[in-house]
Amino acid sequence: MQRLSSPSTFFYKRVFPVFWFGFLTVIVLTSLGLSRAPQRADLAPFLIGPVAMAIFGFVLMRKLVFDLVDEVWLDGDYLLIKSRGESSRIPLRDVINVNATSMTNPRRVTLMLRTESARWGKEITFMPNSPRGFLSAFKTDPVAADLIDRIDALRQRSA
């Protein structure tokens, strides 16, 4: 089996949000602690920034990170999808489209399925296990390109 998803998915989905919201919580609690001093009567400037950052961070993470599956493995003509303790095998012939983003962090590969899966829905999104570099953002993602080639070969074999 070949791993298609990045090992750093765990960091992006579980560790970074804890750091982000924990840092903002510390800022708010520190601001509240400082407000007990007589010169800190107006607390609004100290709370607007962290609250705005928390809202912005949540919306951005919801759009780019929280929908990622934990692991994607290529097993012959099947994909093994794992997320939150659940796993399932999806035949490559059921993938009708492969879309890869290059100018986002984290990079994302989205697989559109022919039929909606009860667990995963119509789309499966993961972080590809691709080499990173300065110029890699301007190149085609190798994981997505390989998947496209494999799916095309399967279609030509069945036709």
Image (cartoon, grey):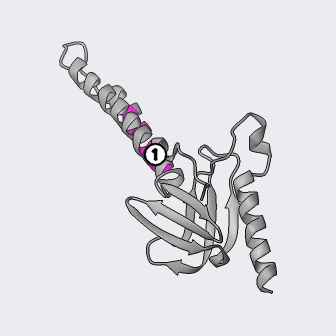
Q: Which residues are magenta?
A: 50-60
Which quadrant of the rendered structure holds the N terminus? bottom right
For disc 1, the marked residue is 10
For the question of whether residue 56 can be seen, the reply is no
Say whether residue 143 is left or right of residue 71.
right
Please state the horizontal and vertical placement of residue 146, each as a whole percent of the image. Answer: 74, 59
Q: Is residue 35 left or right of residue 100?
A: left
| Quadrant in the picture for residue 113 | bottom right
Vertical position of residue 136 compared to residue 66: above or below = above
Task: Give the x, y percent position of residue 68.
Answer: 51, 56
The residue at the point 78 percent across, 65 percent down is: 149
Q: Is residue 96 visible?
A: yes
- Residue 52, percent across and down? 42, 39
Residue 24: horizontal and vertical position, in percent?
A: 36, 32
Name the quadrant containing residue 147: bottom right
Residue at image coords 73%, 71%: 151
User: What secondary structure characterizes most of the magenta part?
Assistant: helix
| Mark 1 burial class by Cα count in 10 Å: few <14, some 14-19, many 20+ | some
